[in-house]
Image (cartoon, rainbow, N blue to C red):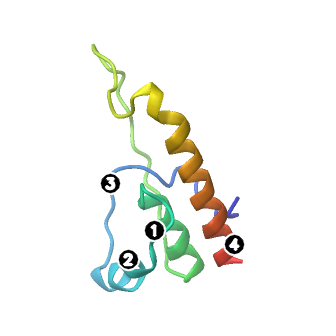
Amino acid sequence: MFHVPYRDIEPGYRLIRKKVLDKIIPNIKYLSYFTSELVVRAHYLGYKVIEVPVEHLKRKKGITNVFQLYKLPRIIFKEFTGLLKLRSEIK
């Protein structure tokens, strides 16, 4: 959707220069989970973004409880709308 050369822009770990954050954070407004928007905006502003592979271990027991199933339709709609707005702004 944004034609960025990254495989995964939503991992939890980041090393970011403060001056980059100071420039980008005030403009983040469309996505609830702002890290994707942060990476897209950094890319389009010409900042260097480097991906380092992260190995995910299989869960030994239990299940994720990040999202409750009944909330997913609203979350998906809100995030998709945010993606469209961000794409429109970036163009």
- Tell me the amino acid under the disc marked 2: Ile
Q: Nearer the viewer, mark 4 or mark 3?
A: 4
Label 2 to label 4, Cα distance in Å?
Answer: 18 Å
Return the disc, 1 or 3, that comes first in the chain's sequence: 3
Tag 1–tag 4 contact (CB < 8 Å) = no
Judging by the rendered image, the residue that carries numbered circle 4 is 88
Where residue 21 sits in the image (x, y, percent)?
A: 34, 78
- Tell me the amino acid under the disc marked 1: Leu
Tag 2–tag 4 contact (CB < 8 Å) = no
Label 4 to label 3, Cα distance in Å?
Answer: 28 Å
- Tell me the amino acid under the disc marked 4: Ser
Q: Secondary structure at mark 4?
A: helix
Around disc 3, counting alpha carbons within 10 Å, would you say few (fewer than 14), some (14 to 19), or many (20 or more)?
few
Tell me: residue 80, above or below residue 42.
above
Q: Nearer the viewer, mark 2 or mark 4?
A: 4
Q: Nearer the viewer, mark 1 or mark 4?
A: 4
- Name the residue located 56 percent from the left edge and 82 percent from the top edge: 46
Q: Nearer the viewer, mark 1 or mark 3?
A: 1
Q: Nearer the viewer, residue 80 or 19?
A: 80
Where residue 26 sits in the image (x, y, percent)?
A: 38, 81
Give the left or right position of residue 7, taking residue 18 as reference. right
- Tell me the amino acid under the disc marked 3: Tyr
Label 1 to label 4, Cα distance in Å?
Answer: 16 Å
Judging by the rendered image, the residue that carries numbered circle 2 is 25
Judging by the rendered image, the residue that carries numbered circle 3 is 13
The numbered dot on residue 38 is 1
Return the disc, 4 or 3, that comes first in the chain's sequence: 3
Tag 1–tag 2 contact (CB < 8 Å) = yes
